[in-house]
Image (cartoon, grey):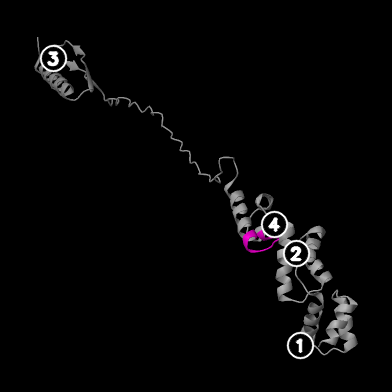
Amino acid sequence: MVTPLRAGILLAATSLTLASCASEPEIVTVTETVTASPEKSTVTSTRSTTSSATPEPATDTATEPRETTTETTTTPTTTRAAAADGTPREFRAAVDKAVSYNSTSGFSKQGLYEQLLYEGFPEAAAQYGVDNVSADWSNNALRTAESYNSMSGFSRQGLHDQLIYEGFTAEQAQYGVNNVQADWSANALRTANSYLQTSAFSDAGLYDQLLYEGFTPEQASYALANL
């Protein structure tokens, strides 16, 4: 026998069930306690509602390995070009420069080496240049002696010393003064006149100065006699 009260309870339970279907996961539990009594029915209804949030699916956050690119920068290096025989370009240039100087001036080997250094060539290249130029160093000493003799009145000894100063060997310097076309007495006179243009000498003082310059007593006397 369904009492009106029980029918109401059942109706309420049905409504709750329909509501739970529409919004899961809500769980409704209805507990009924019915005491049969002609006068009175006691119904105890317990409603338990459990609401649980549906867990979100785990997101696969596996990190893909990052590709690392390493760039290698290569700095170009400049190498000096070498000839077929392996001679560096700068060495060949030193030879060319040495040939050019040798064709226009009478350098000694040492003087030409120092000139190449002055031009900026490394020591090794400068040495290679003077070692490979076709030069007659004794003839260059003569060329230099002739140049000096045309410009100034050197004595024989003074010209020899000057050639040594220019880097010629003693043998090359001697070759130069032995073969230069010079009138040493005339050079003594030229030197005496040059001194008198810049300073007032006595005859004795001028004579001593000419001896100091390397002229012989005969050459100094010639100069004083022809002033």
Q: Position of residue 38 (x, y in %)?
A: 13, 11
Task: Give the spatial CA distance, label 2 vs label 1.
Answer: 27 Å
**Magenta region:** 102-115
Task: Answer above or below: position of 170 versus 13.
Answer: below
Residue under numbered circle 4: 113
Task: State the quadrant of the C terminus.
Answer: bottom right
Viewer-nearest of discs 3 and 2:
2
Query: For this view, does 220 lie left or right of residue 167?
Result: right
Q: Earlier in the sequence, mark 1 or mark 4?
A: 4
Q: Position of residue 97 (x, y in %)?
A: 61, 57
Q: Amino acid at mark 4?
A: Tyr
Q: Residues within 10 Å of mark 3 (few under 14, many from 20)?
A: few
Q: Residues within 10 Å of mark 4 (few under 14, many from 20)?
A: many
Q: Amino acid at mark 1?
A: Gln
Q: Position of residue 73 (x, y in %)?
A: 48, 41
Tag 2 near tag 1, CB within 8 Å: no
Viewer-nearest of discs 1 and 3:
1
Residue under numbered circle 1: 197
Q: Amino acid at mark 2?
A: Glu
Q: Position of residue 72 (x, y in %)?
A: 48, 38
Give the residue drawn at x 75%, y 70%: 181
Q: For residue 110, say whether it is visible.
A: no
Residue under numbered circle 2: 166
Q: Earlier in the sequence, mark 2 or mark 1?
A: 2
